[in-house]
Image: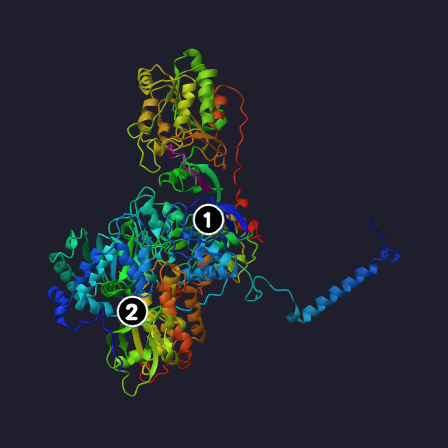
Amino acid sequence: MPKITINGQEVEVEEGSTVIEAYKKLDENIAHYCWHPGLSIAGVCRLCMVEVEGHPRLQIACNTTVQDGMVVNNNSEKVRDTVKWGLDFHLINHPLDCPICDQAGECGLQEQYMEYGKYDPEMAERKVKKRKVVDLGPTVVLDSERCILCSRCVRFTEEVTETNELGIFNRGDRSEIGTFKDKPLDNKYSLNTVDICPVGALTSKDFRFRQRVWYLKEADTICTGCSTGCSVKVYYNEEGAWRVKPRHNPDINGYWMCDEGRDVYKFVNKDVRLLTGLQRKDGQNQELPSVDAAKLAGTVVRDELEKDKNGVALVMTGQFTVEETQSLVGTFAGDLGCKQVYHWINNEDSFDSFDGLLLRGDRNPNTKGLEKVLNDQAINNTWADLKQKLESGAIKTLVVAAPENPSLFPDLDEKIALFSKVQNLVWLSAAKNEALDGLNTNVWQVPLKTFIEKSGTYVNFQGKEQPVKAVTTIIEDALTLTEVAGLLKGSDVNVTDEAQKMTSLKYNYFTQKRGNL
Amino acid sequence: MITETKLLSEHYDNPEFKGIEGYKKLGGYKVLGDALKMDKQKIIDEVKASGLRGRGGAGFPTGVKWGFLPKNDETRYLLCNADEGEPGTFKDRKMMERAPHQLIEGMIISAFAINSPKSYIYIRGEYDSCIEACEKAIEEAYKAGYLGKNILGSGFDHDMDVYRGAGAYICGEETGMISSLEGKKGQPKLKPPFPAVQGYLGKPTIVNNVETLAAVKYIIRDGADAYRKHGTEKSAGTKLFSVSGNVQDPKTVEVPLGMPLMDLIELCGGLKPGRKLKAVIPGGSSAPVLNVEDCAKAKMDYESLAELGSMLGSGAVIIIDDSNCMVDILATIMHFYHHESCGQCTPCREGTGWLNKIVHSIAKGDGRLQDIDLITKVAEHMMGRTICALSDAAALPATSFVSKFRDEFEFFVREGRSKVKGGLNA
Amino acid sequence: MSLVTRPGELSRWYLPGILSGLVFTFKKMVSNIFNKKKMPTLNYPEEQYEYGPRFKGNHVLTVKKDGSLRCTACMLCATNCPAQCITITAAEHEDPTVEKYPISYEIDVLRCVFCGFCEEACPVDAIRMGPEWQTAAISGSEFQYDIRQLAYRPSLQGGVESRVDEQERHSSGI
């Protein structure tokens, strides 16, 4: 393995890697726009200039292969001046849009300007005017003026999705990114182009103008949209979560994630959540604290079990963490002695499908984990069995650990119709469900926490265990399935929030850190 | 009496030379027969020994370039660069119009030397007459058995095609041409890998200028030593110069390298009566300009011009007399490079546009004094910062015009009009 | 440890102090009766002070030539506000040259400390601190100033026009 010296520090890198990769390995600062580790090398932004000892001319780090004994630096006056001018060339036709630009705050141009720029602009001529607010497709909006033509998005559609929707049209400083006639950017991974855009040229329609990025905090978690379990960052504030972006994980998702996975944040926010416990008894709806609702439901379940061992059943979905699944299934099979636990598979026809890149037909984050728990308890009941028992009226009380993301369960209404044949329905779910409000059975609804509010482990399709930490609390009254399991069996449970709820006074980092910034 | 040394252009004036019959009558395709009997390495060595340098602009030794090809039996391609886009150059057009077979013969010999089964002539879109002539000549050569399978019984197969460009200057850059040929947008590719290793369709590719490939025929015919007799030690052979501008008789002339610039002007009839020489652009619009003092010293070969801070380029000599305003000329050049920048690398894309705007604002009389220094500053930071040399090609004339004719720029800024009476903006 | 000095014997004689104070008050009263112009007191609200042009009073949202809001909803004022009294909701404008505008812009004046940081942070001269300062109202909700109050209250007579003109900026190529 060749050794090279970067800014005075020696580092050993893999054979055939480039100088910029060595910089990244050392975590040394190097300016770049067009280079992206997940894409091919374009070498067009000309910012990653480095001085290689023995070379009279500056080289671009992204296309210079490492050779043993190379001595490289990018902090000499010559390099800094070149980068400054490189930046100036990027900025002369860049509009002063920062106030309305969504990228402001996480913009590559702003970052590099603070590092290398801070000069008086010498450009006195008019800027080149291009198209603004161009609709590229269902998810992405383009602003050509802001584009620095790094070609990352073009290379993404060329190399990763291989759909080739984007291209650079025209020449010189009239070049523009664009789509071909009648071929919008509508692939299932289109929003990755927004992530890799170093400036505000490509913006997401979903996130556009909804928040300034400096109001948001980010935290690591995983996507619960399908069984791939991509590593993601969730951006949130005291009002809830606002967007999801992929996080690099070489084992699972690389640098990307699908557009559908980006919608998972929508199911954790207040407007779609069950806020308190609900009881529907004798046609009367009543709100009550979630702990009380769970306790009441527990009493009913235990009473029914005493009457008839086979009159109670539990329906599980692969939406919960391993720990939660274990404790609820364990409570039923162990403490309560009820082995009637069933696995609700949401979309049986497309369950095993795969789109070739990331998105899987199994739209549950923890199917493997649930299967393992059921195996450990030696439970292998079939859905047909449950259906038959429900229709015959053999099961009088049903506990359902329902999905937090109802959009992934196309058969939800159909299943509710089936479940409503019982006398008592205990519905454990993070999501609000209006269909339950008018049922003729007795219903107890207990609000659950969503994936960003609780810690736990998910097992993805590869069998890889992924622990996640609680990020924030959105609904304070919500419970985890573990807590519900405890309440159902009648023990006293100490209910706590794992993550602190963000309070509004702390959200404004700018005012809090005035002077440091 | 100054005369031309006609090697390539010997039979230009003979209309028969265009057709295969006339060409054969005048000794055509004889060399090919001899060459096909030679050892391939021997041809390459001969070209190396002749000191032939690329006639397209960069002046890279041709034999050395051929030597970069990997020593394996991968398919390799020979591309003839006939995308003659450099403003002021018209030597290749004349060659293709008047002696297409000469080019084809040179190409077949070269292709044989590098063992390439397929070659393309990439001709710029505006050259209708050349495309017609080359296509006709290739057809004739196929019929006569000089192209196709088993050429002249040697067992060497070769196919040749004409590819019509769409008139982009940047496609004259070898990797830009390869992109265009591959059906992509004509944009230069990152180097390394160089085309000799990974070029057209990812295969080793040699790109040579029309004049270079035609000269190969004469090197093989006369031998390297005979070829070296022309020209200087380091710049061997003859060169076609396209002399244009304010001379009495603008034309293509073939002279040995190393001829004094003033003699070349003389050869083209000298300046118009009553005019004085002001400047010469010796190698196409991308070459730095020479002022009168430089012109007196200048010899037309690679080294002497490099010493004067300019370059021989494609051999397009543009003579400028005292009736021209240098600001106007630079504005025209800058407009060209702004228009032709492919837009890939930022310094070139934005820099050519910026320079164009500054120079035009000066040429409109709206300039500021600091703009003159700004031209130099911007140009300096465009140089050597991009994938291909177009950025340098735009920056070099800008810096040289400003440094050598600063008084004219300053006059324009101060007075808002040209220093030259009778100029466009006078 | 601090030393405490007790008042001396003399201070027990308080009457002279009271009397001298009364004399001063009486003198002022008499002089005010005869020289009303020098009197510093104003008969508010009939009479009011003229404040300097840099006085930081109630906020004004400026408008463009066509009367629409100049604000681009960049949230820099809200970010910069130390009292966190500004709440903005942005939306997409139909006109691509405008692109972003606030559908709601609210200032909680009871929280505002009138520091003027919003004015300083604004990149487009959309918010200014005006000369008005009378913020009386009879219910708490009236202190939540909205766009109608901030930009189009009757005292502004149709709105204050911004110095920064978008059309001019665009045409001059900025």
Residue A195 pos. (x, y %): 40, 47
Is B166 in front, or is B17? B17
Vertically, is B75 above or below B130? above
Which residue corresponds to mark 2?
A: B237
Name the residue located 48 percent from the left edge and 37 percent from the top edge: A474
Q: Decide: marks 1, 2 in contact (CB < 8 A)?
A: no
Which residue corresponds to mark 1?
A: A213
Residue placed furthest toward the right: C9
Q: Quadrant of residue A270?
A: top left
Side (left or right) of C153 relative to B341: right
Is B132 in front, or is B217? B217
Which chain does the residue under circle 2 lie in? B
Q: Specify the segment rendered in magenta.
A: A225-235
Q: Give the colour scheme shown.
A: rainbow
Can residue B364 be seen at all in this image of the molecule? no
Which chain does the residue under circle 1 lie in? A
